[in-house]
Amino acid sequence: MNYITSCPKCETQFLLNKAHIKAHRGKVQCGHCEHVFNAKNRLTEVSDDINSTEEYQASLEHANQESMTESAHNDTYPESIPDGETELIDKPIYIGEFSPTITEPITIEDLTTDPKFSKKKIKLNLWFSLASFFLLVLTALQAIYFMRTKLAAEYPQFKPLLVKTCDLLNCEIGLPKDIDFLAIDDSDMQEDEDYQGVINFSSSLINNANYAQAYPNIELTLTNTEDRPVLRKLIKPTEYLVANTKIHNGMHAHEEVRIKLAINPSDIAVAGYRVLLVY
């Protein structure tokens, strides 16, 4: 079975057979203007003895003008062509002006992809990747900034670099203040034998960390016989350390410092005490 179709753009007619239509679901490319269209939508069935468009035109000259017009614009796809048997290839057939010559087919992507749109999409993806990388680096730098003291303590090999960076940013790298690694032990409180009303407090301050830490403050609370606070005193490192101690160097790793204090509670009756380390 043969068919006549025409290009909707330039109206050039072509002769097709059922194999041509089945090959690519009816999609063809005009050999005259290179327009791609679906031949199924513009098919006219002709007899098998017509082998060219010239023969078809000759046969139309003997037909009625009205029949010729209806035949030329027939949009009905013949039921004799089994659409279900067509191959699932979404590519058009290239057809010449007077013969259905098949050449390299054009894919749908070739017809619909906009090169400018693809370039814009690539640029957008590139900018998105750069922005994501910048945010990742910024987050890492912020984490280093806020954790600089602990990083310098746990990784002393990086401390010189962190110190130089802080000099540029007008910040400081102090000593860590991990209160959980500090302990106070062997505490005792006794009345002074030489001075009436004076209480001597002694204890040991221990740094259990593997790095140096800042000296803490000592909160000493004196209690009465009912274990109620009667006097609370915050003792700073300058008060409980010996005179020549370099406080800015902090307590070395696993260092133990002995503390001795003399307290005058005046006329307050003292029966006990509590000790707390704070920063």
Image (cartoon, rainbow, N blue to C red):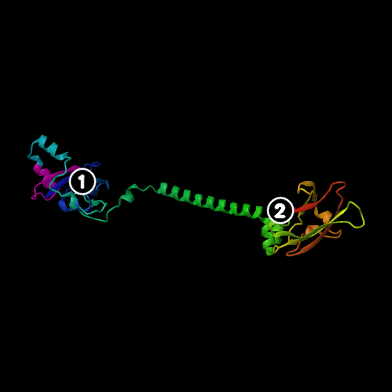
- At numbered mark 1, what does the secondary structure look like: helix, strand or loop? helix
Is 278 situated left or right of 31 in this image?
A: right
Residue 141 in picture, x, y percent from top left:
62, 54
Q: Residues within 10 Å of mark 2 (few under 14, many from 20)?
A: few
Residue 26 percent coordinates (x, y): 21, 48
Q: Is residue 218 visible?
A: no
Q: Which residue is mark 1?
A: 39
| Residue 77, image x, y percentages | 16, 44
Return the residue at label 2.
168
Q: Nearer the viewer, residue 187 or 215?
A: 187
Left or right: where does residue 271 sit relative to residue 166? right
Q: Tell me which numbered mark, 1 or 2, is placed earlier along the sequence.
A: 1
| In the image, residue 251 lies in the stretch drawn in magenta | no
Residue type pointed to by label 1: Ala
Residue 51 covered by magenta stretch: yes
**Going by the picture, which residue comes out furthest to the top?**
66
**Amino acid bearing label 2:** Leu
**Chain part drawn in magenta:** 40-59
Spatial CA span between label 1 and label 2: 74 Å
